[in-house]
Image (cartoon, rainbow, N blue to C red):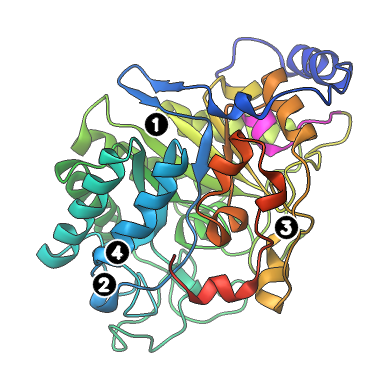
């Protein structure tokens, strides 16, 4: 690892710092609304992040005025950083539906430019999440049913053969597509980009041993499996310059396996994260199903807390913030009620993480930040799965 301190020293300090803090129920929600300097050139109006959540309201890949208004409402209410739903890169195998927004083509880019303008006018900052589904894309999907789905080893998320391994030429082509998408995002005014590197999509398929069985330089040990992500990050950095923020969303769990753990120990996690940090990542967005669950034995730190300790980089925590069950319930037709934020605020005050992503609560209620800040907890809306099919 590139960290100069030993892991044992870091872990000892982590346990001391976070496990001995007393719970303070009097902490104010105002903690969430402190401005945050993400980089030397980008300051956010609050610590609140709207994470990428698939919406599919962009016919033909073009985000329209309703999409711009949707994001603007969250910025007006106090969200500091909006990360858009996955915006697909210019590659025929990237996506499985025609209503997912694209980060290429004149009409789509004009639509995104209006989204950016509206969010900025409301005081927010915004990144697109750049996305390629890899082998998670069903074969024969629109808008390019003729294009085969691709992945590092042609394996689906269960580890079963479903296609051919990507050639190095295909890998290089996809890397260039990511870089072009990031360059276009910068050109039309986005404040940075996030890479979807979690949940079993293409970048994650290279990271995960179950779906990456390659024997060339893109497969094998942890460092080799990280090479594709490193290549993408370096290509984006080369296209966008040193001051354009790059975030990456990471997770242990996958769509097909909620118990997956590509990084079994803090040492493995640190080795991997520092490869990405050295390549140019500015922000780690650490996806967990419940933010309050510890990542490794012997510490209360969640995945974001460990990422911060091991790299020193800014981190985003996420997972059931403000709600009484985790997000998969939404896809089973279950709602969620509101819960207090005391533990979240304590961890934020302790410095375990820097930013807090609020998903379903913000999806259901664009006024959630304002209501939290003003103490209007009795007005918070319960999450109803019907919100997944609406844009408000």
The C terminus - image quarter: bottom left
- Contact between marks 3 and 4 (CB within 8 A): the answer is no
Asked whether residue 248 is drawn in magenta, I would say no
Distance of label 3 from label 4 (alpha carbons): 27 Å
Mark 3, other Cα within 10 Å: few <14 / some 14–19 / many ≥20: some
In this image, 287 relative to 25: left or right?
left
Q: Quadrant of the N terminus?
A: top right
- Is 303 displayed left or right of 124 in the figure? right
Residue 76 image position (x, y, % from top left): 40, 43
Name the residue located 47 percent from the left edge and 22 percent from the top edge: 36
Q: Is residue 164 above or below residue 89?
A: below
Mark 2: few/some/many CA within 10 Å (<14, 14-19, 20+):
many
Q: Which residue is mark 3?
A: 260
Residue topped by disc 2: 61
| Residue underneath mark 4 | 170
Residue 277 higher or lower than 59, as above or below: above
Cα distance between the residues tagged 4 and 2 = 23 Å
Dot 2 or dot 1, earlier in sequence? 2
Magenta part of the chain: 299-307
Q: Quick one: label 3 or label 2, which is nearer the N terminus? A: 2
Cα distance between the residues tagged 2 and 1: 30 Å
Q: Which residue: 57% across, 61% down?
A: 364
Q: Is residue 180 above or below residue 254?
A: above
């Amino acid at each position: 690892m590139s960290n100069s301190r030993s892991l044992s020293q870091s872990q000892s300090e982590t346990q001391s710092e976070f496990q001995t803090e007393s719970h303070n129920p009097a902490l104010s929600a105002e903690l969430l609304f402190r401005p945050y300097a993400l980089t030397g050139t980008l300051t956010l109006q609050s610590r609140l992040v709207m994470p990428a959540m698939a919406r599919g309201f962009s016919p033909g890949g073009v985000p329209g005025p309703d999409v711009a208004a949707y994001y603007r409402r969250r910025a007006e209410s106090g969200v500091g950083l909006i990360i858009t739903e996955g915006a697909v890169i210019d590659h025929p195998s990237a996506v499985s539906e025609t209503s997912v927004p694209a980060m290429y083509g004149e009409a789509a880019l004009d639509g995104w430019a209006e989204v950016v303008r509206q969010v900025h006018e409301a005081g927010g900052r915004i990144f697109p999440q750049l996305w390629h589904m890899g082998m998670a894309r069903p074969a024969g999907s629109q808008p390019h049913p003729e294009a085969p789905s691709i992945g590092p080893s042609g394996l689906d998320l269960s580890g079963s053969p479903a296609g051919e391994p990507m050639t190095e030429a295909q890998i290089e082509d996809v890397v260039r597509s990511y870089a072009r998408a990031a360059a276009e995002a910068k050109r039309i005014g986005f404040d940075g980009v996030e890479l979807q590197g979690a949940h079993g999509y293409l970048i994650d398929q290279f990271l995960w041993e179950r779906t990456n069985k390659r024997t060339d330089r893109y497969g094998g040990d942890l460092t080799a499996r990280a090479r594709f992500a490193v290549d993408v990050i370096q290509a984006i950095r080369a296209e966008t310059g040193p001051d354009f923020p790059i975030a990456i969303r990471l997770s242990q769990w996958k769509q097909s396996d909620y118990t997956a753990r590509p990084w079994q120990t803090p040492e493995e996690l640190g080795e991997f994260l520092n490869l990405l940090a050295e390549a140019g990542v500015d922000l780690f967005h650490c996806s967990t199903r419940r933010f309050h669950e510890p990542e490794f034995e012997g510490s209360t730190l969640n995945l974001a807390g460990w990422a911060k300790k091991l790299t020193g980089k800014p981190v985003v925590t996420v997972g059931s913030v403000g709600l009484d069950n985790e997000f998969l319930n939404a896809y089973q037709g279950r709602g969620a009620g509101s819960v207090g934020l005391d533990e979240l605020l304590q961890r934020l005050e302790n410095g375990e993480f820097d930013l807090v992503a609020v998903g379903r609560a913000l999806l259901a209620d664009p006024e959630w930040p304002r209501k939290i800040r003003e103490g209007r907890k009795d007005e918070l809306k319960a999450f109803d799965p019907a919100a997944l099919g609406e844009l408000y």
